[in-house]
Amino acid sequence: MSESRAKTGIFKRGLLAALCVAAVQLVSYAQVYEQSPLKLSVVTDRLSFMEGEPVEISLIVKNTTDRTVSFSMYDVFYTTFQPVAYLMDGREAESAVQYRQMNRTVQDVVRYIEPRTVRIAPDEKIVKRIDLRNCYDFTAGQKYRVRAFFMPDAKNPFVLRSENSLEIQIAQVDRDVDESIELPRRYAGGITP
């Protein structure tokens, strides 16, 4: 009986030690995530868009360190830069990205693609402009919250989330337009058309 208790005690201590090591690694990963040399923000010129017009946003990646930083960029849409639109209840809006509709991951898409290496000098920014209509099927009359994600290498699981989010609105086009106004044939000053 005492030998069984000893084995159980050794097992419990070994399990506790493994959990402690895992916790330290998890904390280290969280610190690396928080101390990324790159910061991401999402901006737009306006927050209200008419139905059918481009919904353009800019994703800005800034190097916040005093050394040059590099990342891998893939020339495939919605891989390195990923804006995400959420409905106001927190669910993601309907995606229009083809590979996502086929239930494929970013890693599946870039598996055989060679990336470009991009270098950002200290305090330098890179701006990526995206029309959200290429990413999502928007419904007129709805509001959406937009957040951006950046993958320094889409083949690896590290993702940088934008420090901010935007609330945009897609306004409905008024389809009931009054009849056109007829202009007078004579204008002041005697000029005739």
Image: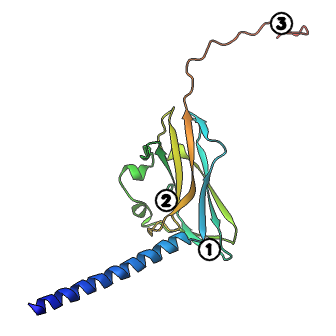
Q: What element carries label 1?
A: strand
The residue that appears at 64% across and 47% down in the rendered structure is 44
Kind of residue sitting beneath label 1: Val
Q: Where does residue 28 sit, x and y in percent of width and height?
A: 47, 77
Residue corresponding to mark 3: 186
Give the Cα separation between the discs numbered 3 and 1. Answer: 68 Å
Residue 171 sits in quarter: top right
Q: Where does residue 183 sit, x and y in percent of width and height?
A: 75, 10
The residue that appears at 39% across and 59% down in the rendered structure is 105
Q: Where does residue 68 sit, x and y in percent of width and height?
A: 65, 75
Q: Where does residue 123 sit, x and y in percent of width and height?
A: 70, 68
| Residue at the outermost right position | 189
Residue corresponding to mark 1: 69
- 127 w.r.t. 49: above or below: below
Q: Can residue 81 be spotted in the picture?
A: no
Residue corresponding to mark 2: 79
Kind of residue sitting beneath label 2: Thr
- 12 w.r.t. 85: above or below: below
Q: What element carries label 3?
A: loop
| Residue at the outermost front position | 2
Q: Mark 2 or mark 3, which is nearer the start of the sequence?
A: 2
Q: Can residue 98 be spotted in the picture?
A: yes
Q: Residue 135 carries which label?
A: none
Left or right of residue 191: residue 102 = left
Residue 55 sits in quarter: top right
| Image quarter hosting the C terminus | top right
